[in-house]
Amino acid sequence: MTAQTDRTLLQTIEILAEAAPEEGFSLREIFDRLDESAFGAGLFLLALPCCIPFLYGVPQVVALPMLALAFQMVIGREEPWLPAKLAARKIDRKGLTQMARGGRKWFGWIEAIIRPRLSVITGRRSERVIGAFLFLFCASILVPLPMTNTVPGMAVAVTAFGLMQKDGLAVIGGSILGICWVGALIAGAFLGLNVITHISTAVFGS
């Protein structure tokens, strides 16, 4: 982090939730308060609500901004930027509190084991490739089916945290999780299409 180096990102999010007014903060205000310019921190923060089962509303708020950040990684932008309409989206205090608690519950362990390693994976040359994977994972969050945000949200969060901490092993682990998820979605779509085709053929004929 570029500021408050004595605090971890999870601690900063917890403090942010405690300080939030009832109406919460806009995404721009949250990014400014984090004082963090890295794509990893922004994507990790936005992925948190997607990782929490049965948290509705907030994942829909953050999905498009996540796509925007991942796309900027693909095109090689050095610092994250959000369009005004996306930056103005708000997360209320309740949502921020759930994010902070969920972040501590699901990712508190990662702070103890993550460390710089396999730096070639987190270098500038690799960042565009990682951004392409993250874009794919973020896009899968928009699939309009129940519980489709949790697994890709975790994949984005682990990958983003690895990027932020220069841990190539975490980036690989998060990417594998996301690739498996997207593969499962595609396989499920093909299976569903085949079932529908067989049913329609049986009912209406060839």
Image (tube, helix red, strand yellow):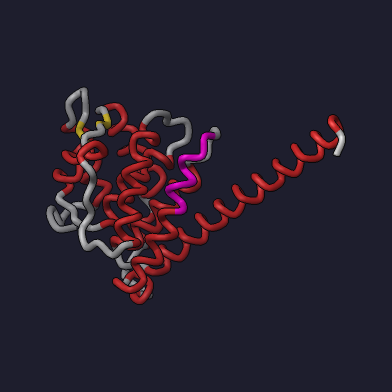
Q: Is residue 172 visible?
A: yes
- Which residue sits at x=24%, y=36%? 85
Q: Is residue 191 left or right of residue 49?
A: right
The stretch in magenta equals 136-144
Picture coordinates of residue 6, whole percent (x, y): 15, 55
Residue at 35%, 61% in the rendered image: 74
31 vs 87, nearest the viewer: 87
In percent of width and height, residue 67 lies at 36, 48
Residue 142 belongs to magenta span: yes
- Pick the quarter of the image with the C terminus: top right
Specify whether residue 149 is painted magenta. no
Which of the 4 image quadrants contains residue 50?
A: top left
- Which quadrant of the view contains residue 122? bottom left
Identify the residue at image location x=43%, y=38%: 52
Q: Residue furthest left?
A: 3
Decide: is 34 above or below 133.
Answer: above
